[in-house]
Image: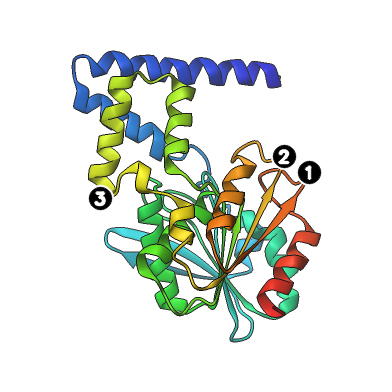
Amino acid sequence: MELINKIAYFTLTKSIGLYINLVSYIFPKKAARLAYKFFTQPREGKLLPNAIPDILKEAEQEVLFHEENSIQTYTWKGNETKILLVHGWESNASRWEQFINYFRKSKSTIIALDGPGQGLSSGVEFNIPQYAKHVNALVERFQPQFIIGHSMGGAACLYYQFKYNNPILEKMVILGAPSEFEILLNNYKRTISLNEKTFQLLTEKFTERFKISPSEFSGKKFASTFNLKGLIAHDIDDDVVAFNEGKEIAKAWKSAKFIETKGLGHSLHDENLYQKINNFLFEE
């Protein structure tokens, strides 16, 4: 069954790439829009209002509004110490269930959000600059001292602090996050076999859309400007984001420490790791 799924995925992705490449010769701007759409629209992670996971039902829910977007938030109330959780691609706030159950012991207030186009938040597009705006809306609303991001959520946290330089935050934890946006783009190009013409159009569209080129969009460059304390954890068996990406972020971040794990994969769910994060947040 797994082999069949892999074959189906391979066939679908290559078919999409072939179609976009063909369109680029006649309608280049349309090809760029299509390539952008498939890169930025999550296929998983949405939730139905009448079927949300139990862990989210236990939270106090609030909807924030930013520009034309609604942002679904969840708060597990505790004391005045607040932790903001930022999930990754094709996911939602429920990915933090194990983490939340562990950190309830700290008596802290835990806050999470559904990212753009995921969970119960509005939209169809997921991108880091927009996600950073949503993170900023939550930081302004809840005033957390700590922020923890996983995967693309971690990348959004790095960009957020670089862009907003928020003094409210005291410590940041980054879990399995990519550093270089160019690597993500090149992986996408290779996965669906985009031709050079289409890839150049896509790169130009990103630069126009976000006012920053993919080559400048670098987690390690962002982190090199930070003064707040950081903790980066990455698993050597991560098959989604290369282990070296986490090491590069940690190397550039002057006031950060790096934790290497093994056997946890990309998810990084583990009580031993949680304990190390707990020590970093509350004891160091």
- In the image, residue 114 above or below residue 243: below
The disc at residue 237 is 2
Label 3 CA crowd tier, 10 Å (few <14, some 14–19, many 20+): few
Label 1 CA crowd tier, 10 Å (few <14, some 14–19, many 20+): few
| Contact between labelled residues 1 and 2, with CB atoms less than 8 Å apart | yes
Amino acid at pointer 3: Lys
- In the image, residue 206 above or below residue 161: above
Tell me which residue sits at (47%, 68%) in the image: 226
Amino acid at pointer 1: Gly
Residue 107 % position (x, y):
70, 81
Amino acid at pointer 2: Asp
Tell me which residue sits at (69%, 79%) in the image: 282
Label 2 CA crowd tier, 10 Å (few <14, some 14–19, many 20+): some
The disc at residue 263 is 1
N-terminal of the pair, mark 1 or mark 3, is 3
Q: Tell me the SS state at disc 2.
A: loop
Whole-Å distance between the Cαs marked 1 and 3?
38 Å
Q: Quadrant of the N terminus?
A: top right
Q: Tell me the SS state at disc 1.
A: loop
